[in-house]
Image: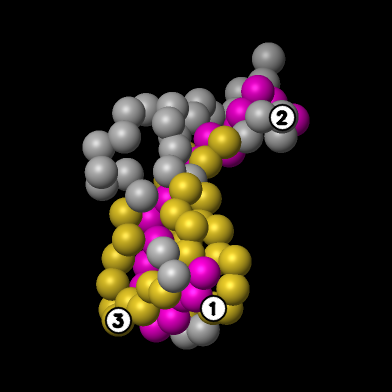
Amino acid sequence: LDTLALSHSTVDFASHGSTAGTFTTLNVENLSGNSTFIMRADVVGEGNGVNNKGDLLNISGSSAGNHVLAIRNQGSEATTG
């Protein structure tokens, strides 16, 4: 997208029906307004931060306004022992 202007909006990266383990990238040149981005991530990966995966919001130009990232863990929980 060239320009994404949002007004009190929510962008849910999982809403398009992607399957578990697949993630979405949103490429935007210019972002403005105020919004919440609901994104998914596998915060554990393979452990020790190796091969972490997740949704990506890529802003290549400018950003303005107030935006919130809400991250949902889509991987396993960290365990010990």
Classify 10 Å Cα crowding around label 3: few (below 14), some (14-19), many (20 and above). Answer: few
Residue found at the very far right of the displayed protein: 48
Q: Residue at x 71, y 34 (%)?
A: 49
Closer to the observer: label 2 or label 1?
1
Residue 40, disc: none
Residue 37 in which image quadrant: bottom left
**Dot 3: element:** strand
Residue 63, disc: 1
The quarter of the image holding the N terminus is bottom left
**Can you identify the residue that label 3 sits on?**
7
Classify 10 Å Cα crowding around label 1: few (below 14), some (14-19), many (20 and above). Answer: some
**Answer yes or no: do the residues labelled 3 and 2 have beta carbons within 8 Å?**
no
Q: Residue at x 29, y 78 (%)?
A: 8
Above or below, 78 against 40 in this view is above
Q: Nearer the viewer, residue 47 or 79?
A: 47
Closer to the observer: label 3 or label 2?
3
**Can you identify the residue that label 2 sits on?**
50
Magenta segment, which residues?
29-48
